[in-house]
Amino acid sequence: MKVLVTGASGFLGSHIVDACARAGDEVRVLVRAESDLSYLRTVPDVEFAYGDLRDPTSLRRAVEGIDVVHHSAARVTDRGTRAQFLEENVAGTERLMSAARMAGARCFVFISSPSALMGVRGGEQLHIDESEPFPARHLNLYSETKAAAERLVLAADRTDFTTVALRPRAVWGPRDHSGFMPRLIAKMMTGSLPDLSGGRPVYASLCYCENAAEACVRAARADGVGGRAYFIADARPVEIWSTLALLAQRFGGIPPTRQVPPGLLQALAFTADMIWKLPPLARHSSPPLSRYTLALLTRSATYDTSAARRDLTPPMVDHSAGMARLESWIDSIGGVDEFIRKVQ
């Protein structure tokens, strides 16, 4: 089939390109001319469509003749105003989906996130499944706009236009320069990451990049997935703080041991969130600590992926194999010092 991948110059998007190519698909990528396209230019037979989710004309060109859209592009940082998040995550998704439907595409695979379920007053989420409702108030603009976009996508499902949302959790692996894992590794290399666990275990589902990408390929080929969302994660959750200690050991960093009182952390995160709502700050920088970041590191969040295993595919790569591939990639780009230098 002929597929379009958005966000292809990014981490997960580039792995979706790889997975589609392995499956024998003809791959077109929607990219900006100023993006780093160095990796994509090494993938044989990839077709480049230059454009932007804000430009309907470029979207119409990008989806011409396409069977399946894999929509991975999104504003995923905690930097930005409400208008920016709505434009990129909601309006951009709606424009792309409309263009794809009008052009005769038969399937739209939307890369959502479990963050769409993160609420202001949310607590632990242990082994939850897709019946979990969206919160009344989301934790941040990213969570809110991913939920809004997912609703739009799933409501657009038709017999001749299948829409499906995948929610990979904390995607990690080679070629990641800006996600949660490289940022945490960078902090451990300088000894600046404190232990935020509060002295208790914090469990999390993670998703190795190839497992997420393979789920996208399977979703484009599966029957009975229309109008549904699926949690995508590795076979087993991990305990965050012991995993970070192991990463420090692997890469020569300093394991997080310095404790910070939970009440102080919550007060600092709340204050930073309020200050960074000011447009001049929101447009140009991320808060040093946010309630969202704090929740990712202090709230257990694990997911029941039985629906994805049944309808799509079980995860192909286990945690230890993924870690070995991550280490090998870091060595291939010049070692951990070069890796840390590139962390955004």
Image (spheres, grey):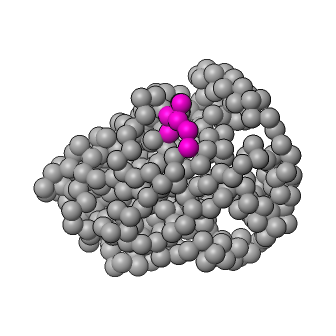
Quarter location, residue 287:
top right
Please name whichever residue, 165 or 137, is drawn nearer the observer in this view of the structure.
137
**Residue 39 higher or lower than 270, as above or below:** below
Q: Is residue 56 visible?
A: no
Residue at horizontal 23 percent and vertical 56 percent from the top: 226
Is residue 175 within the magenta segment? no
The number of numbered discs placed on residues in the rendered structure image is: 0
**In the image, 175: left or right of 58?**
right
Residue at horizontal 22 percent and vertical 45 percent from the top: 156
Is residue 119 within the magenta segment? yes
Measured as percent of width and height from the top left, residue 154 is found at 27, 47
Residue at horizontal 72 percent and vertical 48 percent from the top: 200
Image quadrant in which the N terminus is located: bottom left
Q: Is residue 139 visible?
A: yes
**View extreme (front): residue:** 200
**In the image, 93: left or right of 32?**
left
Measured as percent of width and height from the top left, residue 291 is found at 63, 34
**View extreme (left): residue:** 159
Q: Main secondary structure of the magenta part?
A: loop
Question: In the image, which residues are magenta?
Answer: 118-124
Measured as percent of width and height from the top left, residue 52 is found at 41, 46
